[in-house]
Amino acid sequence: MKIGIPRALLYHYYYPFWKTYFDSLGIETVVSSPTNKWIMDKGIKYSVPEICVPIKVYLGHVLELIDRGVDYIFVPRFVSIQKGQFFCPKFMGLPDIIRHTFPEMEPVMLSPYVESTTDDLATSLKQYQIFEDKFGITRSDNRKALKKAETVWKLFREYSLNGYDIPEATQKAMSEGCQTIGDYKRSLDDKYEYAEVTIGVLGYVYNIYDSVISLDIVNRLKEMGVRIKTFEMIDDETLKKQLANMPKTLFWTFSDKLFAAGNHFYHDPDVDGIIHVTAFGCGPDSMLGKLLELDSTKFEKPFMTVRIDEHSGENHLQTRAEAFVDMLKRRKRKLKKGALA
Amino acid sequence: MKVTFPYMGTTVVYKKLLEMLGHDVILPPKPTRKTIDIGVKYSPEFACFPLKVIMGSYFEAIQKGAEVIVTSGGNGPCRAGFYERVHQRILESEGHDIDFIVFDSMFRDPQTFYRNIERLRDGTPWHKVLKSLLLIYDMIGKLDHLEKEVQRIRAYEKNRGETTRIWEAIQKDFDQAYTSHTMKSAFKKGKEKLQSIPVKHVDKEDCIKIGIVGEIYVVMEDSINMKMEQLLNSLGAEVERSQYLSQWVTYNMLPKWINWTHEKAVLKKGEPYIPILIGGHAKQSVGQIVDYGQRDFDGVVHLMPFGCLPELVSQSIVPKISEDYNIPVLTISLDEQTGIANNQTRVEAFLDLVRGKRKQRLNKEEKMVGKKPESYCTSG
């Protein structure tokens, strides 16, 4: 028996968790291929035209898995991973979108409710009870698997917090579970010693790390000799501090994190500029983008919005990114000169 | 205090309530092209349409001298809960230091809710506040009752535009009424006025009923949905909306355990399609389409602001419901790029389709029963 995991949306944040969980229950998993033209086209064909590109892509991934003949598809319903906060309504209705668009898929969908009070999914056992009934797993095995998944996922987060991007962190956490982290941190710092500028890249993991959706902006910037910081590299305490004096925070967990990260980047003297990568029509981003943009003049830090959808052009992005990086470099040199003179 | 509020639907109601609490009310002008342009200029590009319109109407109200804005809040997951924060920031950055009184759900944060009430009450004795509230509640119910009549009669009026004119006059009458007695007579007078509108006779098989569902702001505010109700009426269709102010108020004011309102029933009907509340009015929209389907409506117009998060989910599900209940649905998403002619064409085509479908169904029934259905369904 095979369970298909679509390589989209929060796959990029929870894959180490899910993979370990299913592995230790002895269930085979299949991950869809990295986003490609076929997936993109299928997704666009079957979704409503106005919806954002990550959701379209998700539908494409689901179709690819069906094509590859999996027995079940893992489509969790993301409701909330923090008290008083939610996911974007599209995440909450994701299984509904899929089962009503493709009625034949309803029986093969596994849709646990993701509803917990921290972003560590293992804290609410209740979500995973549907697997007990479906696959005849005992409660204690389930618990053990969750424990193991939790450990690996925590390690993955630890790598992220030490400055590794998601693909690196996933690979490290999954393969070298027992290594200590301190050494990696040092070697990473060496790697970036000569980076001239640091850019805070704001964007959801499923946009940034999907090299088709974001046109691989992270690696593009890296090739230009830029050091990257993203929200998942900042620990929760720091993020919380940024939001402490807000009268009302955003009520979408990841948007809230992005907003806090944006504010952190403004205060962080290491960060020279911010690029906000957002999908066309993204609701939460339309709000937080404006709020951060208004702050840009206050902190005198350059802020650029890159809007992406299924029609994004590669050259256009390359030109804009290069211009932005050049501008940051020039600005930094000028500031240094000013200080010396 | 010089108070203003977002413009939505029958604004007489909010105006009256604030007036009765002793405030100087600055009524924002009805949204026009200009309002929308101002709103679009200052709002985030991809914010939903209601945010932009409300932004514009705030700017207009401030120009007229408003100092305090009273509005409702929310706690997600729909964007509407965050409107006030964005509005406030934008007004601030434009140099307007405006006070906001935001009402979040009273069950979530009773303390702030109470503090807001205190501020708004501004020394008015409690019994008077209670009296005004009851009066207003009564008024909403009466206005909604009349509006439902309007939406039916307007489809058959002989002189184009007469019903709309009378409806505006009725709202003015209510604006002048400050006691339950005057309110009653305004209601009676309104009813009579509506009765006296000359109407055409229409055969029963030509009477069609269209339901409007969708996000509350674009459904209730006709100046931004390209006058959908009037358009449908003028094409000879009776109209019913999914949201009326009285229903909304009752649903939101009652605690969960005695909440047996219309909305509750509608939500129940939406359950098979969207099992949980995902914010906004997605589940209501879905449930309402089911409801219209069960009540044998001829078609549904589904309105949503462009890019509305919850409505995108319901839009994805609409084809399935339409198939399940055999009811045609037309989804129209609205933003500042209005194309009246385009809209008109789409709605006309939709109604042609609905009429054809109805005829087909009646023919089938006729064959089975073997007699002609009763004619004349209008009043008067």
Image: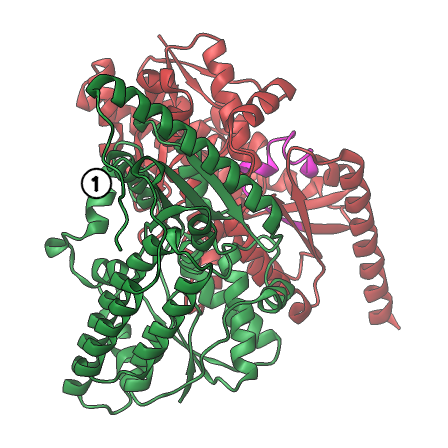
Name the residue: 24% across, 24% down: A130
Question: Crowding near pointer 1: few (<14 within 10 Å), some, many (20+)?
Answer: some
Q: Position of residue A200 (x, y in %)?
A: 64, 51
Camera-nearest residue between A227 and B278: B278
Chain coloured green: B
Camera-nearest residue between A135 and A92: A92
Is A37 situated above or below A217? Answer: above
Say if the magenta span includes residue A94.
no
Q: Position of residue B307 (x, y in %)?
A: 52, 46
As helix, strand or loop, the secondary structure at mark 1 comes to: helix
Quadrant placement of the C terminus of chain B: bottom left
Q: Which residue is mark 1?
A: B268
Camera-nearest residue between B40 and B136: B136
The colour of chain A is: red
Name the residue: 28% across, 86% down: B21
Query: Is residue A40 toward the left or the right of residue B69 in the image?
Result: right
Query: Is residue A225 toward the left or the right of residue B66 in the image?
Result: right
Q: Which residues are magenta?
A: A200-218
Question: Which subunit holds the residue at mark 1?
Answer: B
Q: Position of residue B45 (x, y in %)?
A: 62, 55
Quadrant placement of the N terminus of chain B: bottom left
